[in-house]
Amino acid sequence: MSRVLIIAAHPDDENIAFGATIRNFVDQGRQVELSTFTYIEGARNEMSINRNCLLEKTAKTLRMSNYIVGNFLYNALDGILSLGVVKFIEERIHHDVKIF
C-alpha cells in the first residue's frame, strides 16, 4: 500500500485545499497522513480558536490513517528558520511516502 503525506500550514487547510484529493487517494487504497504546522487559528484577534478538535472528525470523515499537529505559532511561520520546518517534515517522512 502506498502512503501519502499531506502537509498543511493550519488545521482545516487540508479540507479547503485537499479534501477531495485526500478522499480520492483513500478510495484508491492509499494510506493518507496529514501534518499541520500550527495548532491554533485566529491570528487576527485575541480569541484564538483551537481547531485541533475538528481534526479527529476530519480524519474520520476523509478516512485518513493519521494526523499530526505541529507546535509552530500560527502567525510566525514566515519567521521560522527553514531548518526547523525541514526537520518537522523529515520527522514525518517514511521511506515510502509520496509528497505532493
Image: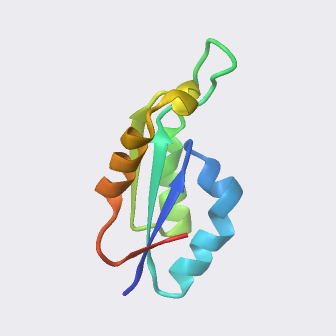
Question: On screen, 53 above or below 1?
Answer: above
Residue at image location 59% in from the left, 30% down from the top: 41
**Tag count:** 0
Expressed as whole percent of the image width and height from the top left, the position of residue 98 reads: 45, 75
Question: On screen, 35 above or below 43?
Answer: below
Q: Is residue 15 left or right of residue 55?
A: right
Residue at image location 34% in from the left, 64% down from the top: 93
Expressed as whole percent of the image width and height from the top left, the position of residue 4 reads: 46, 72
**Residue 92 occupies which quadrant of the picture?**
bottom left
Q: Which quarter of the figure is the N terminus placed in? A: bottom left
**Residue 3 occupies which quadrant of the picture?**
bottom left
Q: Which quarter of the figure is the C terminus placed in? A: bottom right
- Asked which colour scheme the image uses, the reply is rainbow
Nearest the viewer among 83 and 13 is 83
Expressed as whole percent of the image width and height from the top left, the position of residue 77 reads: 54, 33
Residue at image location 64% in from the left, 63% down from the top: 18
Residue at image location 36% in from the left, 47% down from the top: 88
Expressed as whole percent of the image width and height from the top left, the position of residue 29 reads: 47, 86
Question: On screen, 61 above or below 72?
Answer: below
